[in-house]
Image (cartoon, rainbow, N blue to C red):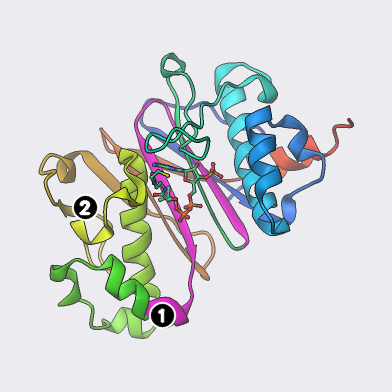
């Protein structure tokens, strides 16, 4: 990942995935949040959760602001949950803005994926061998369970169970791109095995989606699995470090 001088322009097929490190959080960052986001921030009990939330909101605001020609704190983001109406839903820019985004956090990383209007979902998870059995139960579709014996490539994985996490992030990225989130069980989706290029193979009741939903695995940190899903034409993915954007903001006084 080379550090860009600024936020690059967003071509029609582009999907920018911005990687922000937890250590890049600065106490000034939350000044860019709107009142809804400040309320969300105050509800987190753990400092790291609070920081991850702030980083996601700030990177989204800076990147969208550059694409829309707005100051970061003026970017309108609606966080209304489609399921219950509370403010913990996917952040949505206004429909006529012509941009879409998705946010994911895990451990040391916060990812923000942005497209020129194509529905997008991103997911990152820290590899945790202790969670492998639970993932196998809650994530794998019946057809995938028969494939779940480790391949030679997976036996060589530095972290046991890493392949299961690849199933997980591919599916959660797809569920976030459609906006369903975990209201739809991951076992309803079938994706390619972890040692094959990522692809949605089937989605129960949604036969149109495998041809339209594009999945791409993201490599940024070997201790994590990450994938992005874009609905529409095949995307061109750019992984970009958010470090410089965040450092510039940290210098802003009150
Ligand atoms: C979205 C969801 C899949 C994320 O799970 P996770 O692995 O814990 O968390 P991640 O860090 O990967 O993603 C969280 C981000 O997903 C986004 N998000 C929330 N709901 C979303 C949805 N339905 N679709 C897409 N993205 C969503 C938000 O940006 C959130 O981060 P933020 O609040 O800091 O901006 C899961 O929380 C979910 O399914 N939530 C919705 C459940 C629901 O609708 N229940 C009924 C009403 S309460």
For residue 30, above or below residue 141:
above
Point 31% across, 43% down: residue: 180
For residue 56, above or below residue 8:
below
**Picture quadrant of residue 171:** bottom left
Residue 44 highlighted magenta (yes or no): no
**Picture quadrant of residue 37:** top right
Instruction: Tell me: 30 left or right of 119.
Output: right
In front of the other: 95 or 248: 95
Earlier residue among tags 2 and 1: 1
Mark 2, secondary structure of its residue: strand
**Picture quadrant of residue 199:** bottom left
**Farthest right residue in view:** 253
In front of the other: 30 or 109: 30
Point 47% across, 19% down: residue: 94
Q: Is mark 2 within 8 Å of ligand 1?
A: no
Q: Is mark 1 within 8 Å of ligand 1?
A: no
| Number of the front mark, 2 or 1 | 2
Res. 26 mark: none
Camera sees residue 58: no
The x, y position of residue 124, in whole percent, is 47, 57
Look at mark 2 in the image and give the residue it sits on.
200
For residue 193, above or below residue 206:
below
The x, y position of residue 157, in whole percent, is 41, 80
In front of the other: 35 or 61: 35
Mark 1, secondary structure of its residue: loop
Point 26% across, 56% down: residue: 185
Look at mark 1 in the image and give the residue it sits on.
157
What are the residue bounds of the magenta stretch? 108-132
Residue 119 highlighted magenta (yes or no): yes
Packing grade of label 1 (10 A; few <14, some 14-19, many >=20) is: some
The x, y position of residue 4, in whole percent, is 63, 39
The C terminus lies in quadrant: top right
């Amino acid at each position: 990942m080379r550090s860009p001088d600024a936020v690059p322009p967003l071509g029609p097929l582009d999907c920018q995935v911005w990687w922000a490190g937890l250590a890049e959080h600065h106490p000034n960052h939350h000044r860019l949040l709107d009142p809804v986001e400040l309320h969300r921030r105050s509800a987190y009990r753990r400092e790291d959760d609070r920081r991850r939330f702030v980083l996601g909101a700030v990177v989204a605001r800076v990147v969208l602001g550059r694409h829309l020609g707005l100051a970061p704190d003026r970017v309108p983001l609606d966080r209304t949950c489609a399921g219950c109406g509370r403010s913990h839903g996917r952040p949505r820019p206004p429909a006529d803005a012509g941009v879409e985004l998705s946010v994911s956090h895990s451990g040391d990383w916060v990812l923000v994926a942005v497209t020129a209007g194509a529905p997008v979902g991103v997911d990152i998870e820290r590899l945790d061998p202790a969670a492998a059995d639970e993932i196998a139960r809650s994530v794998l579709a019946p057809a995938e369970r028969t494939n779940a014996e480790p391949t030679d490539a997976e036996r060589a994985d530095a972290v046991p169970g890493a392949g299961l996490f690849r199933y997980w992030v591919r599916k959660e990225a797809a569920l976030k791109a459609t906006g369903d989130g975990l209201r739809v069980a991951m076992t309803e989706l079938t994706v390619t095995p972890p040692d094959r290029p990522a692809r949605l193979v089937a989605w129960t009741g949604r036969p149109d989606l495998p041809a339209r939903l594009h999945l791409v695995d993201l490599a940024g940190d070997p201790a994590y699995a990450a994938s992005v899903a874009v609905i529409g034409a095949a995307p061109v993915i750019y992984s970009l470090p958010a470090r410089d954007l965040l450092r510039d903001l940290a210098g802003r006084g009150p």
